[in-house]
Image (cartoon, helix red, strand yellow):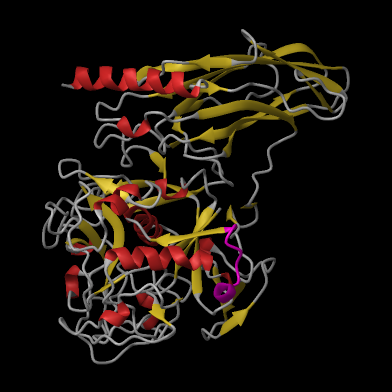
């Protein structure tokens, strides 16, 4: 059966290539051309670096099919020549002009050789994934020590379409075009704040940075304020959109689960913040981004790029709603089962992310998805331009990236307290970590209130532990449940928005499910949180966090199955991704 599937896929790929004529190809390789330089020379600090591509500049690879052998290999060398005492620096970028393959379906590997033992070469790169979309991938910096006479740095770039052993039909008929760009000077990591050791937030039009004083009084500030954020001090960057909604910046990082991997025993997570849209760290830790296999090559053994930052290209970070949403027009539903009003299950109401407000519940999965998508279009309300932001319903991977940051050295690094208030007010806490069914809201800016945030201070994300169950866009087998989706609508949702699972494949790394639990059970996740993986067509979707009734089993690492129907206990949360 597997052989038949492979033959079918190969024939389909060949047919697709014949139809579109370009196939899968490196469209061209060239050096960056500036001034009077040619396509194979770079002028640098009084010297010249020559670039030679073995076998010419172009690579065309028709008839591509999944294989563990590279589908393309490119050798190129740089030759340094200078009579001055100035060193010659360069950096190498893989420019992806087009990639319609799914995230990490294609991978690359760089082998670097300091042929003549002069200066420093760009480090070799382990096999790494390529995100969907247009992007630039930084391959590394190199230096020739001057004076130098025709010394060589040699590079070998390999591209792969690995055979996963599973159906890869989703990647039939896809397109990939890329080229190498070599430029003078060291790479400057756009978006990276060297002083803070983290990527600077991407502010959309109309957003205002905010911070708080020692009494938790809110203060408007500016993007260049050095006191706006400090992740070393667990003060995550916060900003408000033009309507007053609160958002928290989640910067690009890699992580390693240093204890408690795939266990109900609460473990530890170490986070390495990454520079710009690269996988480079302070200290040059090796970061994996492909080839994850539980117990063979996984996050208990290696640092992996968190996959939430691969969203139509490599992202420097994204904005998480600070609280569960409310609706500015008001909500009519009650607090108990059977008290939902159909007037709340609509796309015409307006999302607001604010504290001390009733959480928007009684909304089904389909409506929550549509409402979240519409945020980016409502420019007159939120102030941003729709060309700069993608809004969408949070998915499992995006929930996981905030959960892991919270458990790391940059977050609470402890159990986030429950929102235990029984009337679903955003930002509330209880009198203790596992409180439930409380008649009083401990407000978000009080000493106990801040313990319900992911940082144990006012700078974190709230309502991730209890309060309302939160819909996250994860689904098994394209089952519909009672979500309100049609099969066509659910099937057409892009893989960047939804995490798809099979009943017999219960993991996507980074989602705070397999890695941080021993399996389904009452107290099988970290901090003894409840865990139940969807396993049937009735309840095929995920909800996270638990609700105010959950006591010890509610929490950031709680996951559960749901039908996706409108219910008084279920809410949702949008995120904002820079385009």
User: Residue 376, image x and y in percent?
Assistant: 51, 64
Q: Quadrant of residue 193?
A: bottom right
Q: What residue is rendered at 22% in x and 74% in y?
A: 547
Measured from the top left, where is residue 300 in percent x and y?
A: 31, 41
Q: Is residue 271 visible?
A: yes
Q: Position of residue 516 (x, y in %)?
A: 25, 52
Specify the quadrant that holds the N terminus.
top left
Residue extending farthest to the front is: 19
Magenta highlight on residue 344: no
Residue at image x 66%, y 14%?
77
Q: Is residue 151 left or right of residue 501?
A: right
Residue placed furthest toward the top: 55
Residue 224 left/right relative to 231: right
Q: Residue 152, image x and y in percent? A: 69, 13
- Please tell me whether residue 388 is drawn above or below residue 132 in the rendered image: below
> Looking at the picture, does residue 75 appear above or below residue 413?
above
Q: Residue at x 39, y 17 (%)?
A: 14
Which region is colored magenta?
380-388
**Which image quarter: residue 327?**
bottom left
Look at the magenta stretch and give its main secondary structure: loop
317 or 55: nearer the eye?
55
């Amino acid at each position: 059966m597997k052989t038949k599937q492979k033959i079918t896929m190969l024939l389909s790929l060949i047919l697709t290539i014949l139809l579109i004529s370009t196939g899968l190809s490196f469209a061209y390789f060239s050096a960056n051309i500036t001034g009077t330089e040619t396509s194979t020379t770079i002028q640098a600090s009084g010297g010249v670096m020559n670039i030679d591509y073995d076998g010419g500049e172009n690579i065309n690879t028709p008839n591509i099919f999944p294989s563990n052998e590279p589908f393309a290999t490119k050798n190129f060398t740089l030759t340094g020549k200078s009579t001055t005492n100035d060193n010659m620096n360069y950096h190498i970028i893989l420019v992806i002009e087009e990639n319609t393959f799914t995230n990490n379906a294609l991978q690359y590997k760089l082998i670097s050789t300091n042929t003549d033992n002069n200066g420093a070469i760009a480090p070799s790169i382990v096999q790494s994934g390529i995100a969907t979309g247009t992007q630039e991938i930084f391959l590394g910096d190199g230096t020739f020590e001057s004076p130098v006479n025709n010394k060589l740095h040699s590079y070998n770039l390999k591209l792969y379409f690995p055979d996963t052993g599973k159906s890869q039909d989703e990647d039939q008929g896809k397109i990939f075009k890329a080229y190498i760009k070599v430029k003078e000077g060291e790479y400057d990591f756009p978006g990276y704040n060297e002083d803070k050791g983290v990527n600077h937030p991407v502010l959309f039009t109309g957003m205002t940075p905010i911070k708080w004083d020692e009494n938790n009084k809110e203060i408007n500030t500016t993007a260049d304020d050095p006191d706006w954020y400090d992740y070393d001090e667990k003060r995550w960057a916060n900003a408000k959109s033009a309507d007053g909604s609160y958002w928290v910046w989640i910067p690009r990082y890699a992580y390693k689960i240093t204890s408690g991997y795939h266990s109900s025993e609460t473990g530890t997570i170490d986070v390495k913040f990454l520079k710009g849209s690269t996988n480079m760290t302070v200290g040059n830790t090796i970061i994996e981004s492909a080839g994850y296999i539980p117990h063979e090559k996984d996050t208990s053994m290696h640092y992996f790029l968190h996959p939430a930052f691969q969203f139509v290209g490599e992202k420097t970070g994204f904005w998480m709603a600070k609280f569960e949403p409310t609706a500015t027009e008001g909500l009519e539903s009650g607090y108990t089962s059977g008290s939902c009003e159909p007037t709340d299950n609509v796309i015409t109401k307006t999302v607001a992310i604010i504290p001390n407000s009733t959480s928007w519940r009684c909304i089904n999965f389909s409506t929550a998805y549509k409402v979240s998508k519409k945020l980016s279009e409502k420019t007159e309300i939120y102030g941003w331009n729709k060309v700069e932001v993608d809004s969408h319903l949070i998915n499992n991977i995006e929930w996981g990236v905030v959960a892991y940051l919270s458990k790391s050295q940059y977050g609470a690094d402890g159990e986030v307290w429950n929102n235990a208030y029984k009337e679903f007010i955003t930002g509330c806490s209880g009198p203790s970590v596992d409180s439930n069914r409380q008649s009083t809201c401990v407000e978000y800016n009080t000493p106990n209130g801040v313990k319900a945030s992911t940082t144990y201070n006012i700078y974190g994300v709230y309502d991730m532990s209890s309060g309302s169950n939160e819909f996250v866009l994860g689904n098994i087998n394209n089952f519909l449940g009672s979500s309100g989706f049609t099969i066509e609508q659910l099937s057409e949702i892009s893989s960047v928005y939804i995490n798809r699972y099979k009943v017999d494949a219960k993991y996507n790394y980074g989602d705070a499910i397999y890695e941080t639990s021993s399996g389904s059970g009452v107290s099988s996740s970290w901090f003894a949180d409840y865990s139940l993986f969807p396993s049937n067509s009735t309840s095929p979707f995920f909800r996270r966090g638990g609700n105010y009734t959950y006591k010890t089993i509610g929490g950031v690492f709680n996951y559960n199955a749901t039908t996706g129907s409108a219910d008084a206990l279920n809410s949702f949360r949008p995120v904002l991704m820079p385009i």
